Image (tube, rainbow, N blue to C red):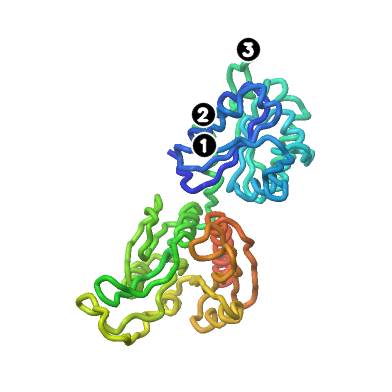
């Protein structure tokens, strides 16, 4: 079964008898782990009620372009930013024509126009309408713009005719949506990702740690797996479940994380150090709980192993990506870390910015190598992780072609 864990799928429902399948589609998407929202056109409401779709999605259904309850009244922008992918099912001939024209005179078409995520349509119409030259031209135009056309299937239609035009069945659409995230950008590669905080024991009940939730690292590991990589996630202490299709190694301390990473580098091509690893640990952990007796307590701290630098020194070289969680002089500090550790790419994470970084749902990143600076705009961490993986994949492949020109012809 397709896995859509932590994916946000926006379902658009347009006017057609196949709209009765949309409720089952939403339920199947949720069964696959997706979070769903539904947008209906006015014509769709003639075939299925908003209450039905609200019941199966678990959220209010959106219908109005000008939404006074949305921030600044721009619900189409909010929904376009929320989604990881948009699926219009059923997509009527009329809606396909309006989408091909770039219209934005209702909520669903405006969302599709404002979207920066994959958009797919599942056509559903009479077989003569599907075969009409105007529809074929509109569909071809959508494909040239990168919109995915899923189906249609052939068979008996509600009008009694037989031919192409049936909407694909919900389970097949779920499988097709899952494939939208499987880019293949890292096919055949081994990727190691670290995530979360580390815990450096002071005594059996106390320790030195930080506020990292692990969400960004887990999202990066999931995005690497989606891109086709054999992915290992080395995680410090978090409350997050093990991601599917990924080997997850649970550790506690920086030393344990270092040892787990180094033991798994053979066969790895890319290392992404997202974890917020402690820089120092107590020189010795007390065997029993330290009692509150003295007015002052002094802890001697010693350096923890530098995982990024150790990976960068490893031969044969692994493409090494680091994260820099910074609050002050952020860009200068990130560039210094890039140079000092001799890594290939660094992602600057401004943890002091409101609503970003640790414990937040959203984040934004600045990527630096020795020659370029790329900004990944604010987005949910799952979507940001996919953009990061795409950047890493392109840089890794380009580096390989530069080092070995023959590789471009393989």
Q: Secondary structure at mark 1?
A: loop
| Image location (x, y in percent) of residue 280 | 38, 81
Q: On the image, numbered disc 3 is attached to which residue?
A: 160
Q: Residues within 10 Å of mark 3 (few under 14, many from 20)?
A: few
The image quarter in which residue 338 lies: bottom right
**In what element is the residue under mark 2?**
helix
138, 284: nearer the viewer: 284
Which residue was labeled with disc 2?
A: 24
- Identity of the residue drawn at 61% across and 38% down: 87
Going 45% across and 58% down the picture, which residue do you hit?
218
User: Alpha carbon of mark 1 to alpha carbon of mark 2: how far?
Assistant: 13 Å
- What numbered label is drawn on residue 235? none
Quick one: label 1 or label 2, which is nearer the N terminus?
2
Quadrant in which the C terminus is drawn? bottom right
* Mark 1 to mark 3 CA distance (whole Å): 34 Å
* Residue that label 1 marks: 58
Do the residues bearing badges 2 and 3 touch, measured as CB atoms within 8 Å? no
Residue neighbourhood size for the residue with mark 2, other residues' Cα within 10 Å, grouped as few (<14), some (14–19), many (≥20): some
Residue 403 visible in the displayed image: yes
């Amino acid at each position: 079964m397709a896995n859509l864990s932590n994916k946000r799928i926006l379902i658009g429902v347009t006017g057609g008898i196949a709209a009765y399948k949309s409720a089952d589609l939403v339920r199947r998407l949720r069964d696959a782990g997706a979070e769903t929202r539904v947008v209906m056109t006015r014509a769709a409401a003639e075939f299925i009620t908003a209450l039905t779709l609200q019941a199966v999605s678990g959220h209010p259904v959106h219908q109005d372009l000008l939404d006074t309850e949305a921030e600044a009244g721009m619900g189409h922008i909010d929904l376009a930013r929320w989604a990881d992918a948009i699926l219009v099912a059923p997509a009527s001939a009329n809606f396909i024509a309006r989408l091909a024209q770039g219209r934005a005179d209702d909520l669903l078409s405006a969302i599709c126009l404002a979207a920066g995520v994959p958009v797919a349509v599942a056509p559903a119409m009479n077989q003569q309408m599907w075969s009409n030259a105007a529809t074929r031209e509109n569909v071809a135009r959508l494909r040239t713009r990168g919109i995915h056309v899923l189906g249609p299937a052939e068979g008996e239609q509600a009008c009694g005719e037989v031919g192409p035009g049936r909407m694909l069945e919900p389970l097949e659409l779920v499988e097709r949506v899952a494939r939208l995230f499987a880019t293949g950008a890292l096919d055949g590669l081994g990727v190691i990702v670290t995530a979360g905080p580390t815990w450096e024991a002071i005594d059996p009940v106390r320790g030195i740690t930080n506020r990292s939730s692990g969400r960004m690292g887990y999202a990066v590991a999931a995005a690497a797996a989606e891109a086709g990589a054999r992915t290992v996630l080395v995680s410090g202490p978090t409350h997050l479940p093990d991601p599917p299709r990924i080997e997850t190694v649970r550790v506690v301390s920086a030393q344990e994380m270092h040892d787990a990473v180094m033991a798994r580098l053979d066969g790895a091509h890319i290392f992404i150090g997202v974890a917020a690893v402690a820089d120092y640990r107590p020189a010795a952990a007390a065997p029993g709980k330290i009692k509150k007796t003295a007015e002052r307590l002094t802890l001697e701290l010693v350096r923890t192993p530098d995982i990024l630098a150790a990976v960068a020194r490893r031969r044969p070289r692994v493409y090494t990506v680091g994260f820099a969680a910074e609050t002050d002089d952020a860009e200068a500090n990130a560039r210094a870390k890039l140079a000092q550790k001799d890594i290939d790419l660094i992602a600057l994470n401004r943890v002091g910015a409101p609503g970003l970084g640790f414990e937040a749902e959203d984040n934004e990143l600045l990527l630096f190598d020795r020659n370029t600076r790329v900004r990944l705009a604010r987005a949910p961490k799952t979507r940001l992780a996919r953009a990061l993986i795409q950047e890493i994949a392109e840089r890794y492949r380009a580096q390989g072609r530069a080092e070995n020109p023959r590789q471009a012809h393989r």
